[in-house]
Image (cartoon, rainbow, N blue to C red):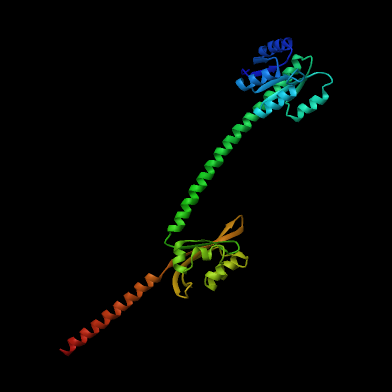
Amino acid sequence: MTMNKILLIDDEPDIVRVLGISLRADGYEVIPALSGAEGLEAFAKDKPEIVITDIKMPGMDGIEVLEKIKNLDPNTEVIIITGHGDIDNTIEALKYGASDFINKPVRDDALSIALKRAQEKLDIKRQLKEYTIDLEKKINFATSELRRQTNFQIKLIRSSNDGIVATDRDLKIVIFNPEAESIFGYTQSEVLYKMSVTELYPAELASRFRDTISGNDETREFPWIETSITSKDGQTIPVRFSGTVLQEKDEEMGTVAFFQDLREIKRLEKELVRSERLAAIGQTIAGLAHGIK
């Protein structure tokens, strides 16, 4: 068996000697102490996982030893040696967390059973500690990974050239990125958790999301279309729009919509049309001039 330290405390030297022989024969390293105070000093020095102490000793008795050891290390297994008629002290020892009890005179089989139980408890505590540490590592790793992914997603949303607007299942806006601010003209503080899609989107788009969330429409994906929105200052802003209703286990959890600002594209299209018209007019004038000649 693995060499384990046992602190053995009893004011009777003969008991300490006889039990010490038995324990060493079973493979334990025995730390003897002939009083409660001496036992506490030895415990502080050697940190044994198992303590065997007599309940009745002059000066510091076994109850006080038990209480002080449990205060120093609650995981220590403390086995109490009791005599006949020690029922009240036994109950008090239980109150302070005694691991087990063996009666005087101590029989080898009773001592062996008590030690086996104490060892099993220590093994369970070690396994639980290892499991807890392993679980904490896994949780910390998962939390770190989730935080990394979340930070990446936040940066992606913030830096996106598309206006991104996401809502909860009540269609309350929970994400409103900088490009959405530029398109709609509202700040995040004006929108987040304050406005719903019915207040922000055109009526047609808002009703499509509302119908899906309420179960009146089974459409989950809205492909890209050209439409327009009304900004905070009343401007009509041309945009491309697409959207998705988010689901989890067949339950609608919210929505996300993407808006592309088409103002610059529309301006360039008008410039192109204007330049083509000017070119056509120029060609017409040139043709007329040539005819006159």
Residue at horizontal 82 percent and vertical 26 percent from the top = 88
Image quarter of residue 132: top right
Image position, residue 198 (x, y; %)? 56, 70
Q: Quadrant of the C terminus?
A: bottom left
Q: Is residue 208 left or right of residue 54?
A: left
Residue at horizontal 76 percent and vertical 30 percent from the top = 95
Front residue of 291 and 244: 244
Image position, residue 123 (x, y; %)? 65, 27
Q: Is residue 2 left or right of residue 85?
A: left
Q: Quadrant of the N terminus?
A: top right
Front residue of 150 and 82: 82
Q: Is residue 120 visible?
A: no
Q: Is residue 285 left or right of residue 53?
A: left
Image position, residue 70 (x, y; %)? 68, 28
Image position, residue 169 (x, y; %)? 60, 61
Front residue of 156 and 96: 96
Give above or below for 48 relative to 153. above
Q: Is residue 108 visible?
A: yes
